[in-house]
Image (cartoon, rainbow, N blue to C red):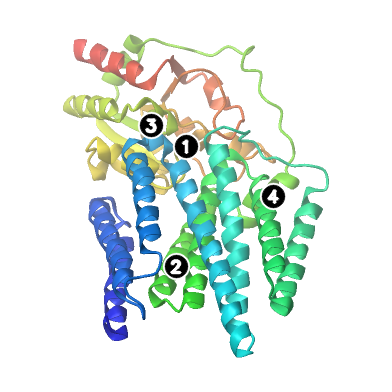
Amino acid sequence: MSRDLYDLIGLVAAVCFILALKGLSHPKTARRGNLIGAAGATIATLVVFFYGDQLPLKNLPLILLAILVGLAIGVPAARKVQLTQMPQLVALFNGVGGGAAALVAIVEYLKLGEEAAKVGEPITAAVLIATIFTVVVGTTSFTGSIITFLKLQELMTTRPVIFPGGRFIIAGNLVAILVCSGWVYSAADTTSVLVLMGLSALFGVLFVLPVGGADVPIVISLLNAFTGLTVAASGYVLEATLLIVAGTLVGASGTILTRLMADAMGRSLFGTLFGAFTATATAAGAADVRPVKSGSAEDVAILLNYARRVVIVPGFGLAVAQAQHTVRELADLLTAKGIDVAYGIHPVAGRMPGHMNVLLAEANVPYDQLVEMDEINPTFPQTDVSIVIGANDVVNPAAKTTPGCPIYGMPILDVQQSGNIIFLKRSMRPGFAGIENELLYDPKTTLLFGDAKASLTKVVGALKAL
C-alpha cells in the first residue's frame, strides 16, 4: 500500500472520529455516533496491517495473539458490565490507553536510540521532548485512573486522602519529574527514562488521592484528556498522522468536558483537585438521633394523585436499583391522569456525564420530559411534588449554606422549594460526597425507605387502585 493511499484511509478514519463526537453530543444521535466511531477505529486498526516497508509485519503472530486476548477481555466486559459500573470501566480503559501510549513511546525511543548510535547522530530534540511528555503524562494518567477506579468501586475511601505536608510532597514530586526530564533530555539512556516513569507513576497517585468521591468524574474526564494528548504525542514520535488527529480530538473534547463539569460543580478545576488541602472539616449530622418523617407507598400515591405538577429527580440510586422502566411507568400513569410530569436532570447526577440521560433513554423516556437544571429550577416553586430517587448530593442545600463542605458552591436542583418532597432511600446513609443532607429533615419531606424499584412498583400499584 502506498503512503498516499495510507494517508487517505487515515483521513477517512479521522473524519469518522469527528462525526462520532458530533453524534455523541445529542441523545438522539448518540447510538449512530458510537457506530461511526467504532467503524473509524476498525479502519484505523486494519490499515496498519497493509502498510509498511516489510510485509507481512514482524511478530505478526504475537500481534494477532494480543488482539485476541484484548477481544477476550473487552467483549465480555462491555456486554456484562452494569450501567452503574460504567464509570469504573471508563477509568480502567482510559488508564490502559495512557499506559500503552507511554510504553510505545519508550519502545520507540529505545529503537531510535539504537539507530542513532549506528549512524553516529543523536535523537532529535523534538522526538526527545515528545517522548518525555508521553511518558510523564501517560504514566500519570495510568496510575491516576487506577486510583479513580478504586474510589468509584469503593475499594478505598471515597473521601479526600490528605496527609501532613501533602502539598509540599506533590510539589516536590513535580520538581523531581522536571529535573529527571532534563536528565532524560541530556543523557538519553534507559535508566533515566525508567526513573522518570516511576516518578510519574507516583505523581498520578498523589494527584488523585486528595480528590473527593463527588469530584472523581471530573478527574476521569481530565485524565481522559491527558490520555488523548499522550496518544497525539506518541503519534508524532511514530510519524502517524492518524494518532495525532485522534489524540488531539480526545484531548480537546476531554478538556472541554472537564471545564463544563467543573463549572457544573461551581468551582475551579484547581479547587477540585487540591481544595481538600484547604477545606474546613465538617461534622457529620446526627442521623441516628434526629427524627424524620417516613411514609408508605399508599401515602405517596395519594399525594401524587392530587398533584398538578410532579418533578422526578433521578440519581445514582435509580441506576443501582435498575428502576428506570418502573419510573417511566409511574410517569406515564401520572400523565394519563392529566398531571404535568418532568425529569430534573443535574449535569453531574450519577457517576459520569449524561449518566441519567442514558439510563432514562434505555426506558424510552421522551426527550422533551428531560429538563436541564437551569431550566427546571425556576419551576420548583410551582411544583406540587418532587420525587428524589437516589439523588442525594445534587439536591443537598449544604452546597449553598455550608462553606467548607465538599460540595459547597455546586449548583443544585432546588427541590426544597417544592410543595412536597418524596425521598426514596435505602437508608439514612449520606450521599457519595459523605455529608449529611438537611433536606431529609425538612417538614415537607417524606422518606420512602427501601429498594427504589420495589418502592416505585408499590407506588404504581397503589396509584392504579385509586
Question: How far apart, in angstroms, are the residues tagged by discs 1 and 3?
Answer: 22 Å
Q: Quick check: 141 left or right of 317?
A: right
Question: How far apart, in angstroms, are the residues tagged by discs 2 and 1?
Answer: 39 Å
Along the polypeptide, which appears first: circle 3 or circle 4?
4
Disc 3 residue type (three-letter): Ala
Residue at 54% across / 48% down in the picture? 265
Q: Secondary structure at mark 3?
A: helix
Counting from the top left corner in percent of width and height, residue 425 is at: 46, 21
Q: Which mark is residue 206?
A: 4
Examine the rendering and report whether any part of residue 93 can be seen.
yes
Residue at 38% across / 73% down in the picture? 242
Residue at 22% across / 55% down in the picture? 32
Examine the rendering and report whether any part of residue 123 can be seen.
no
Disc 4 residue type (three-letter): Leu
Q: Is label 1 or label 4 in front?
A: 4
Q: Secondary structure at mark 1?
A: loop
Quarter placement of the C terminus: top left
Examine the rendered structure and indicate whether residue 268 appears above or below residue 92: below
The front one of 378 and 133 is 133
Callout 2 crowding tier (Cα within 10 Å): few <14, some 14–19, many ≥20: many
Instruction: Give the residue at mark 3.
Output: 319
Q: Which mark is residue 247?
A: 2
Instruction: Give the residue at mark 1.
Output: 414
Along the polypeptide, which appears first: circle 2 or circle 1?
2
Examine the rendered structure and indicate whether residue 49 appears above or below residue 62: below
The front one of 207 and 311 is 207
The front one of 326 and 219 is 219
Residue 122 appears in which quarter of the rendering? bottom right
